[in-house]
């Protein structure tokens, strides 16, 4: 089955080869092609020869194809022959983007090398996305040759990967020293907190020597202990990196990164760090809240439809633990303060920090301190910070400053910028800090109430009654006796 749009084609492999060719011929001008595997319970399903024939027809017939997506939703029972994908890539000479999602490839080692060369020497392929690609069959060889081919192609500059864990074999190939990739976006499902020595993921060792990356983004996978030092070494050698997003386990992991920014790196403009504040030597269960409001304990960092994480367990932390974490946060932020004194290239720094009201208060104070000096950096609190906490903290800081004779926090632009990502806080900040905008808000509320006044709703209902059909009104005016006589006559 295919869509009626001439610029796109959705093709299901459950149909026969003849029907697939007919649909392909009807959409010769398609620029976007999406190939979907059938259900494992489907009555009709292509065999290997049918897939090879269909993929060859897609590459030879659709000469204007620029974007290709292949989705295999039943990876346990349907396999894609590597010959089929090789034939498609070798014939599609204008292809710019390829997305492979949830498939299993099968074939011999010769076919694997051929597929790797198709990625390596493709003249126009610019972006690649590999999501949940399993090992090869029948020898269960990892995807090393394919990743090598992707990283060796100088045209491919943007690669996105979805992997199982940091220890997934082959990840180091896309971040090796000789890799030509410029933008690397990765997301995982598991974490390795205490990996050291030989068990340390090869992926981070590869990042240490990479000098070509311009943008690095890592989501849903906390870096192992010592990842901050590895990233700092990369910043010392890589003079092209402009943006980096990472997740770290401890506040102190970011101190080597701050030192590298202060001394040796002059290219990074945007830094986004998320701290999970996990202790590798003390595994504590976390409480997750799902989309239905139910809570559950888990030891991993989450997968599935989870709304948010409550970083602290239901047992409240002791004062000593809170003091240790606050001390780590202070050391980290002091290191970045020193880095900002010498590094004028960085334009945007974001910290997402978990836990405790005292740490949130310190975050707010640090934010105001950095931005009052004219910096464009800003610091972000966790999402469940309440408006009252921020307002009470700022008011208490101003009162304390007046009592001690220090300068109060009065830069309204700074406060407004800090709260721009929290719409629910805007009204509170307007009420407490900007009387002129409070008047404007009152006028807007008056206009809203005037438009939605209950009397206007009654008028709308009356107008609906007036627009009733004439026959209905005539019948309503008839006496009950007349209606009864009419019923008798009809009988």
Image: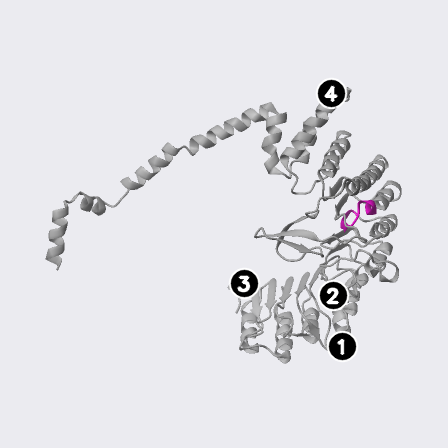
Check disc 1 and report its element: helix, strand or loop. Answer: loop
Q: Is residue 382 left or right of residue 406?
A: left
Q: Which mark is nearer the camera, 1 or 2?
A: 1
Q: Which residue is disc 1 drawn over?
A: 139
Is residue 245 within the magenta segment?
yes
Q: Which mark is nearer the camera, 3 or 4?
A: 4
Name the quadrant of the C terminus. Answer: bottom left
- Structure colour scheme: one colour
Rendering coords of residue 71 (x, y %): 62, 66
Disc on res. 402: 4
Mark toward the start of the polypeptide (2 vs 4): 2
Is residue 231 within the magenta segment?
no
Q: Quick check: marks 4 and 1 in contact, CB under 8 Å?
A: no
What is the CA distance from the residue labelled 2 to the residue labelled 4? Answer: 67 Å
What residue do we see at 61% from left, 67% from top?
73
Label 3: few (<14), some (14–19) or many (≥20) C-alpha neighbours in 10 Å: some
In which quadrant of the rendered view does residue 468 lie? top left
Disc on res. 2: none
Q: Which mark is nearer the camera, 2 or 4?
A: 4
Indicate whether 169 appears above or below 355.
below
Disc on res. 122: 2
Task: Write down the region rendered in magenta.
Answer: 242-254
What is the CA distance from the residue labelled 3 to the residue labelled 2? Answer: 26 Å
What is the CA distance from the residue labelled 1 to the residue labelled 2? Answer: 26 Å
Mark toward the start of the polypeptide (4 vs 1): 1
What is the CA distance from the residue labelled 3 to the residue labelled 1? Answer: 41 Å
């Amino acid at each position: 089955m295919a869509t009626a749009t001439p610029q796109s084609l959705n093709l299901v492999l459950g149909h026969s080869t003849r029907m697939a060719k007919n649909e392909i011929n009807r959409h010769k001008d398609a620029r976007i092609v999406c190939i979907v595997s059938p259900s494992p319970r489907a009555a009709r399903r292509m065999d290997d020869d049918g897939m090879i024939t269909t993929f060859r027809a897609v590459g030879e017939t659709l000469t204007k194809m620029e974007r290709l997506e292949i989705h295999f939703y039943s990876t346990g029972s349907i396999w894609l022959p590597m010959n089929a994908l090789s034939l498609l890539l070798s014939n599609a000479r204008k292809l710019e983007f390829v997305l492979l999602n949830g498939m299993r490839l099968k074939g011999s080692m010769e076919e694997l090398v051929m597929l790797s060369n198709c990625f390596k020497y493709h003249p126009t392929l610019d972006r690649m996305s590999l999501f949940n690609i399993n090992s090869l069959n029948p020898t269960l060889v990892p995807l090393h040759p394919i990743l090598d081919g992707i990283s060796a192609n100088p045209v491919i500059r943007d690669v996105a990967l979805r992997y199982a864990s940091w220890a997934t074999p082959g990840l180091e190939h896309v971040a090796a020293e000789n890799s030509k990739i410029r933008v690397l976006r990765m997301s995982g499902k598991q974490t390795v907190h205490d990996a050291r020595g030989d068990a340390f993921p090869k992926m981070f060792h590869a990042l240490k020597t990479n000098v070509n990356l311009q943008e690095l983004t890592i989501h849903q996978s906390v870096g192992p202990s010592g990842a901050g030092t590895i990233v700092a070494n990369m910043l010392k050698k890589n003079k092209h990196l402009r943006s980096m997003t990472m997740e770290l386990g401890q506040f102190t992991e970011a101190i080597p990164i701050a030192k590298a920014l202060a001394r040796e790196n002059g290219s990074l403009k945007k830094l986004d760090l998320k701290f999970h504040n996990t202790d590798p030597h003390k595994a504590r269960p976390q409480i997750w809240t799902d989309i239905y409001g139910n809570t559950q304990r888990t030891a991993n960092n989450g997968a599935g439809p989870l709304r948010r994480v409550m970083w602290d367990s239901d047992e409240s932390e002791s004062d000593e633990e809170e003091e240790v974490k606050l001390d780590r946060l202070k050391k980290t932020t002091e290191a970045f303060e020193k880095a900002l004194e010498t590094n004028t290239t960085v334009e945007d720094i974001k910290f997402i920090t978990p836990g405790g009201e005292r740490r949130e208060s310190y975050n707010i104070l640090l934010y105001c301190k950095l931005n009052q000096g004219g910096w464009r950096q800003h610091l972000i609190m966790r999402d469940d910070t309440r408006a009252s906490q921020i307002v009470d903290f700022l008011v208490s800081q101003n009162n304390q400053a007046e009592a001690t004779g220090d300068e109060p926090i009065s830069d309204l632009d700074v406060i407004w910028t800090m709260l721009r990502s929290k719409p629910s806080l805007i009204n509170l900040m307007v009420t407490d800090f900007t009387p002129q905008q409070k008047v404007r808000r009152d006028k807007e509320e008056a206009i809203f109430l005037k438009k939605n006044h209950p009397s206007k709703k009654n008028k709308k209902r009356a107008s609906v009654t007036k627009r009733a059909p004439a026959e209905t009104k005539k019948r309503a005016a008839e006496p009950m006796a007349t209606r009864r006589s009419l019923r008798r006559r009809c009988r």
